[in-house]
Structures are given as structure tokens and as C-alpha cells.
Image: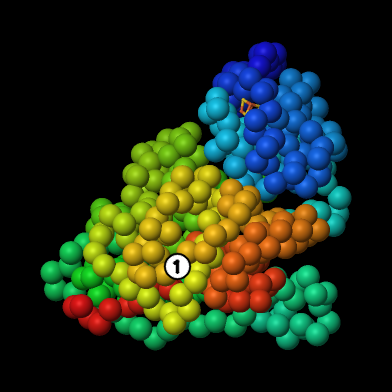
Amino acid sequence: MQTSLPETYLATPEGQRAESVLRSCVHCGFCNATCPTYQLLGDELDGPRGRIYLIKEMLEQDAASDVTGRHLDRCLTCRACETTCPSGVAYGELLEIGRNYLEANRPRSFRERFLRRWLLRVVPNPGAFAFWSSLGRLAKPFLSARLRRQLPARARRSSFVAPEIENPAGTVLLLDGCVQRTATPAVNDTLERLLAARQIRVLRLKDEGCCGGLALHLGEEAAALATMTAGLDRIVPVLDQVDAVISTASGCGVTLKDYGRLLAQDGARSRQAQALADKIMDVGEYLTALGGDWSRASESTRVALHLPCTLQHGQRQGSHPSVLLEAAGYELVATRDDHLCCGSAGSYALLQPELSETLGENKLAALSGEDPDVIATANVGCQMHLGGLAGVPVRHWVELLAVPEAGG
Ligand code: SF4
Ligand code: SF4
């Protein structure tokens, strides 16, 4: 694609990256075929190719319009288009540049600003998120059906304390994530037990903080970078002690794996950011590398597996959960449209509720054709979103693995 970005913009790292991504697109349109919003809305501007054009025009003319804002807001950041693109266009990076530009140059309505500020203050803060979740449960009878479905159920961490392991086979840092620690703490509790039984020492941070993914997707560049550097500073002191840093929320993992790029301009921290990114592993990657036998934790045997976009398109690590679940003795039932987003997409369910709900219902139908006993996924957002709509339990796949007796 030909570009004519302003010289002043081309002199910046964003300008150079934008130009390189734009030039790699040959506007073939293959990506539209797997774009969930293009499929739903049938509008070229709600597909990746159209959004790439909008970003190009905006950057070339140095003009952020409402039309561009509307179509970029509707993008799920699912990156299915990247998986499909034969030219390797880094759409996600271009979208990030486009959103940062829009937020810096186009005012939003009071309602939008309020909601986005609220999200940025509450979601990455486990205390605030737990408070608002409790408040929501108290006010449940007065909430709309849609909001009721998005409320996380009350959940507590288990009282499990891993026994001291004298000669550990490995040491990992297990990240709790900001939403996951409140909404689904059982996931990491199960994993800590699984790892303890394999003689893996697990470290967890008390004040881990947020990965910055939410602010990044909202185009709040300064807030995203501040959150990332604060989180990095908390992790760095233990980084040399661990073989891997494990995330069970693929939405956090995909951001953390990108820290080297995201913090490349941050002087001394850029090396630390890359060192962290090099050690981040999705739980599926880690358990596969660990090897050994797995068994079923559940009487229910028929599982429909939903792979979050952040795992299959963002991290390209979608193969592990199915292999591990089958090795544990589960039957994975046939599903369709596995590449499509469930509509959760971070804060999308709150910011684009109609599209999010339609995508969620479509995903549920695609997962339920063979009447599974349980739906398994790999990210807290998808688990909450589908859990609010599904008639069967929706679990993180790690919870379906049986914890062996210690030493077993
Ligand atoms: S992003 Fe890739 S698939 Fe989409 S139009 Fe550009 S080159 Fe074609
Ligand atoms: S990230 Fe997802 S929703 Fe956005 S353009 Fe790509 S495929 Fe479409």
C-alpha cells in the first residue's frame, strides 16, 4: 500500500512503524473473511482492511474523525485478521497506533469519558473491582439482565498453602492477574496444587498490579506505560529466581509477552521488559514443557473448548489445552467457528454491549452443537462472558485437571 505520511510524523518511532505496517498490506481483503465485526455488520469499514484505510487516512491527513473513531471502537482487537493475513500485516500494532492517536486528538462525549475513566480506575485495581462486584451483587435485582450476566460470582481463594519443597524441580512466578484474582481465584489455586505435586516451587506476588492491557486497548498510552512499568518494577526483583513467569489469563499473557516491544523506548527498563517477556509462558505452554501424565478432575467428560483470541491469535499457543485435556481423558466435542471471538474482548462487553452479546450468543451456539457437559476456556474474561450466557458450567481448562496426591 502506498503511503504519504507527514515528514514530522515519519520522524517518530510510531510514524516509522505505522508506515512499515501500512506498506505491508496489499489490500487483498482475505482478512475480512475471518473478522467477526465484518461478518456481523457487513460494512467494509468494520473489517480490518477498511480500518487499515481509515488509520492511513487519519495519519496522512492528521485528522481524527468520528467515523474513524466509531469503526476503531467496534474492533475487538481479536487479531483473527492477523492469523488470516497472507502478508503478515501486524494489524494489532497499527490499531494500537491508531487508537493512541484518536484518544490524543479527538474528544469523547462525557458519558464515554466517564465510563472509560471508571474502567481504568476499577478494573486494574483488585480492591476496587471486588468492591464494585459486591455492590453489583447487592443491587442485582435492580440491574438490567445484561449487567446481571456480567457480574462475577462471589469467589474466594482457597486456604491451600504449598508445602516447603526441599529440592524443587523448578521455580515459577505465578501471576494472579487483577480481574482473575477476584473473579476466578480457583484457577491459580488449582494450578499451584498441580505444580506443588510436581515438585515445582510457586512464587506469588502480593501486590502484583495490572499488566496494562486494558489501558493499551483503550488507547490510553500514558496510563498503559505507567501501569506496565509499575508492574515490571514489582516483578524484576524475583525474575532471576524463576525459570518461568506463568499466566493463566491469556489476555494478560499476550500483553506481557509484548513488553519488549511496548517498553522498547524506556531506556534502562527496555532490557528488563524483554527479560520478563522472554520468561512469560501461558500455562498450557508450561505444562506441555513440563510433561508427565494428567488425569480428569471432573465426572463430566464431554468438553467444548473455546480458545480465547489472545491465546490462538495473539500468542499463537492455541494447541496446548486440547492436547492436555485429551491426555487427561476428556472427549473434546466438535465445535464450529473456533477462530471467532466470543465478544468479551476486555472491556468490549461494557463499551459495545449489543455487539458483544450477539457475538457471545453466536459463540455459545457454536460451542453447544454437541451438548457438552462443560465449556472450557483459557481467559477470565471469556469465562465470565460465556458463563453469564451458558446453561452449562464454564471453567478454565486448568480446573479440569486432577490434582494428584503429593509426590504422585
Ligand atoms: S491486512 Fe492482510 S489480508 Fe487484510 S487486506 Fe491487508 S494484506 Fe490483505
Ligand atoms: S482485530 Fe478482530 S475485530 Fe478487529 S479488524 Fe481484526 S479480525 Fe476484525
Quadrant where the C terminus sits is bottom left
Quadrant for residue 107, please give it.
top right
Quadrant where the N terminus sits is top right
**Left of 232 or right of it: where is 290?**
left
Of residues 9 and 162, the one nearer the viewer is 162
Please tell me which residue is depicted at 58% across the width and 52% down the height of the picture: 338
Where does residue 216 sit, x and y in percent of width and height? 61, 47
Please tell me which residue is depicted at 59% across the width and 83% down the height of the picture: 154
Please tell me which residue is depicted at 80% across the width and 75% down the height of the picture: 145
- How crowded pointer 1 is (Cα within 10 Å; few <14, some 14-19, many 20+) is rated as some
Q: Is residue 1 visible?
A: yes
**Left of 266 or right of it: where is 148?**
right
Q: Is residue 114 visible?
A: no
Look at the picture and state if 402 lies above or below 119.
below
Of residues 314 and 269, the one nearer the viewer is 314
Where does residue 227 sit, x and y in percent of width and height? 54, 53
Of residues 398 and 231, the one nearer the viewer is 398
Look at the picture and state if 324 lies above or below 60.
below
Where does residue 167 sit, x and y in percent of width and height? 13, 69
Look at the picture and state if 299 lies above or below 66.
below
Quadrant for residue 24, please give it.
top right
Quadrant for residue 155, please give it.
bottom right
Which element is circle 1 on?
A: strand
- Say if disc 1 is inside 8 Å of ligand 2: no
Of residues 301 and 8, the one nearer the viewer is 301
Mark 1 lies on residue: 331
**Left of 195 or right of it: where is 168?**
left
Please tell me which residue is depicted at 26% across the width and 67% down the height of the picture: 293
Look at the picture and state if 14 lies above or below 37.
above
**Left of 343 or right of it: where is 172?**
left
User: Which amino acid type is marked by label 1?
Assistant: Glu
Where does residue 262 sit, x and y in percent of width and height? 50, 39
